Image (tube, rainbow, N blue to C red):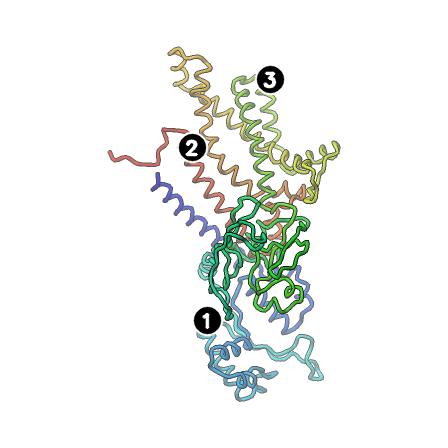
């Protein structure tokens, strides 16, 4: 079995890589890359050469290409010690045209061009854009830069190589005192109360391991999942962090900051990360923090995107199985009778009517009954969950009823059932010991998928009821051309799909002794 699971995992990883590669090809090669500026107000305000530079800068951020301005090249030479600051200052400014370059500038422009063209870059020089009077137009400053599209292989390697970020004491490049890790049984955040924690100095996160009163009670920042940076949906926030951080209003609570200052605050000090020079840049930070670990998340009253999707999805799944299994069994036992006909009508109705239609129908019925029809994270009423759960559960009920009825009828007509009757077994014994057990085996395979898919969310249901879950995330990213989110969510979906398939196989094998993952030599 272990060999089978290892093979399935390897095949699954390969399939995930292929899916991500296909998505990247579609995004970065087949779609018009200028569409990323459709809702960019800054882009629409730029003109002439400045627009070209802004365009390439953004394309580099979105992962389309590598962009190297001539000024950055000169600064890199200074950093590497190849030239001094005076030389850089003398040669950094290019002329309005190549003929206007100083001898020093011309020499470094030539080196810049030769170096980057040898690496496959395309070097572009934009002469100053002037009007008839010789004055620069708005955004017409002369520019020199090198660009190169990123190959698919490079994108894949960079993306998968950055999926898991391991924190270390060498993260901070500046010279700091007492670089290292400290283990304490009395977390300073809890004013010396017993609470084990590992605190870092020189790491990105101040707290690498800590305990608190929220599930799962032990938390870590040592290893962080990075699905990709968002550029428009949640600007500057990683996709995984966007899906897992809490939402809603701030939860104010008594907080003691490292300096000893006490006040009501929503800051979560356990999430503090390092930002060089931040403490001295603001009086607020200086009053609260003793070092540059000043960037913190806040505690909010609601759940995360995954949290809302999972709560709604898992309750809907449980409700679907609780309703579908007994009804499906009853339909099979009462084949062609009233119960079976009513159940068949329901199955046909749900299958034939577009999901958007009956979701809006449920929404209209709910409105008539006075139930909340839009999701409000600030609401304390559990009724806001009812309509999304019902809309999500009823289609699952229909599918489970249909397949359980079909499997049971097939089992009832099997030869082994006829033999069992002939051997004197009662109908109850045959039903419990054979028919139901064998009919349930194919349905068991879908249980892990149903549970894990709850993390994904339901796109249509969440959009109709304005649920702030993960289902809305992909469609929002597509509308805003947020490539980082599209790739990250696709990877998230792919991993859940592969995992649910493998778990389904294992669960089905556990239910059916005839299924074996080992091969016997004959």
| Position of 520 relative to 238 (above/below) | above
Please tell me how crowded label 1 is: few (under 14), some (14-19), or many (20+) other residues with Cα within 10 Å.
few
Q: What quarter of the picture does the N terminus occupy?
A: top left
- The residue carrying mark 3 is 338
Q: Does residue 87 appear left or right of residue 425 in this picture?
A: right
Q: Secondary structure under badge 3?
A: helix
Q: Which of marks 2 and 1 is in front?
A: 2
Q: Earlier in the sequence, mark 2 or mark 1?
A: 1
Residue 192 place in picture, x, y as percent? 56, 53
Q: Does residue 339 appear left or right of residue 512 in this picture?
A: right
Total label count? 3
- The residue carrying mark 2 is 508
**Residues under numbered marks 2 and 1 in contact, where contact means CB atoms less than 8 Å apart:** no
Residue 389 place in picture, x, y as percent? 62, 35
Where is residue 360, by image quadrant?
A: top right
- Residue 125 in sight here: yes
Please tell me how crowded label 3 is: few (under 14), some (14-19), or many (20+) other residues with Cα within 10 Å.
few
Q: How far apart, in angstroms, are the residues tagged by discs 3 and 2?
A: 33 Å
Residue 467 place in picture, x, y as percent? 65, 43
- Seen at 68% across and 56% down, the residue is 263
The disc label shown at residue 120, or none: 1
Q: Secondary structure under badge 2?
A: helix
Determine the residue located farthest toward the bottom in the rendered image: 103
Please tell me how crowded label 2 is: few (under 14), some (14-19), or many (20+) other residues with Cα within 10 Å.
many
Q: How far apart, in angstroms, are the residues tagged by discs 2 and 1?
A: 53 Å
Residue 207 place in picture, x, y as percent? 53, 56
**Residues under numbered marks 3 and 2 in contact, where contact means CB atoms less than 8 Å apart:** no
| Position of 420 relative to 227 (above/below) | above
Q: How far apart, in angstroms, are the residues tagged by discs 3 and 1?
A: 74 Å
Q: Earlier in the sequence, mark 3 or mark 1?
A: 1
């Amino acid at each position: 079995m272990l060999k089978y699971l290892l093979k399935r995992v390897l095949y699954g990883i390969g399939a995930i890589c292929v899916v991500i590669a296909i998505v990247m090809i579609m995004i970065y090669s087949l779609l018009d890359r200028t569409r990323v500026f459709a809702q960019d107000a800054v882009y629409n305000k730029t003109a002439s050469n400045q627009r070209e530079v802004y365009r390439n800068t953004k394309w580099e951020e979105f992962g389309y290409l590598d962009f190297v301005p001539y000024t950055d090249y000169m600064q890199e030479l200074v950093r590497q010690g190849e030239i001094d600051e005076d030389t850089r200052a003398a040669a950094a400014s290019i002329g309005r045209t190549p003929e206007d370059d100083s001898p020093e500038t011309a020499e470094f422009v030539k080196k810049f061009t030769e170096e980057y063209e040898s690496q496959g870059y395309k070097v572009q020089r934009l002469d100053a854009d002037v009007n008839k009077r010789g004055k620069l137009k708005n955004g017409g400053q002369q520019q020199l830069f090198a660009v190169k599209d990123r190959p698919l292989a490079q994108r894949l390697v960079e993306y998968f190589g950055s999926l898991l970020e391991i924190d270390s004491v060498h993260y901070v490049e500046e010279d700091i005192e007492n670089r290292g890790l400290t283990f304490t049984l009395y977390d300073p955040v809890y004013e010396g109360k017993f609470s084990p924690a590992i605190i870092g100095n020189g790491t990105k996160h101040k707290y690498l391991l800590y305990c608190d009163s929220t599930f799962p009670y032990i938390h870590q920042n040592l290893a962080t999942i990075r699905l990709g940076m968002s550029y428009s949906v949640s600007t500057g926030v990683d996709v995984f962090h966007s899906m897992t951080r809490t939402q809603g209003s701030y939860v104010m609570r008594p907080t003691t900051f490292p300096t000893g200052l006490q006040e009501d605050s929503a800051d979560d000090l356990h999430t503090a990360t390092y930002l060089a020079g931040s403490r001295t840049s603001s009086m607020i930070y200086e009053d609260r923090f003793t070092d540059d670990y000043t960037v913190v998340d806040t505690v909010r009253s609601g759940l995360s995107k995954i949290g809302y999707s999972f709560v709604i999805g898992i309750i809907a799944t449980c409700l679907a199985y609780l309703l579908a299994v007994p009804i499906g069994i009853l339909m099979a036992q009462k084949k062609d009778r009233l119960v079976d006909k009513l159940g068949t009508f329901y199955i046909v109705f749900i299958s034939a009517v577009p999901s958007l239609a009956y979701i809006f129908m449920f929404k209209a019925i709910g409105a008539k009954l006075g139930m909340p029809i839009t999701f409000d994270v600030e609401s304390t009423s559990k009724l806001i969950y009812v309509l999304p759960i019902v809309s999500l559960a009823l289609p699952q009920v229909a599918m489970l009823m249909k397949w359980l009825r079909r499997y049971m009828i097939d089992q009832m007509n099997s030869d082994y059932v006829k033999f069992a009757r002939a051997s004197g077994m009662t109908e109850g014994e045959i039903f419990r010991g054979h028919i139901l057990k064998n009919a349930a085996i194919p349905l068991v395979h879908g249980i892990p998928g149903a549970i894990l898919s709850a993390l994904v969310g339901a796109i249509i249901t969440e959009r109709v009821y304005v649920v702030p879950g993960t289902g809305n995330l992909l469609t929002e990213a597509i509308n805003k051309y947020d490539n980082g989110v599209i790739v990250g969510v696709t990877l998230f979906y792919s991993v859940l799909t592969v995992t649910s398939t493998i778990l389904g196989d294992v669960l089905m094998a556990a239910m059916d002794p005839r299924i074996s993952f080992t091969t016997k030599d004959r």
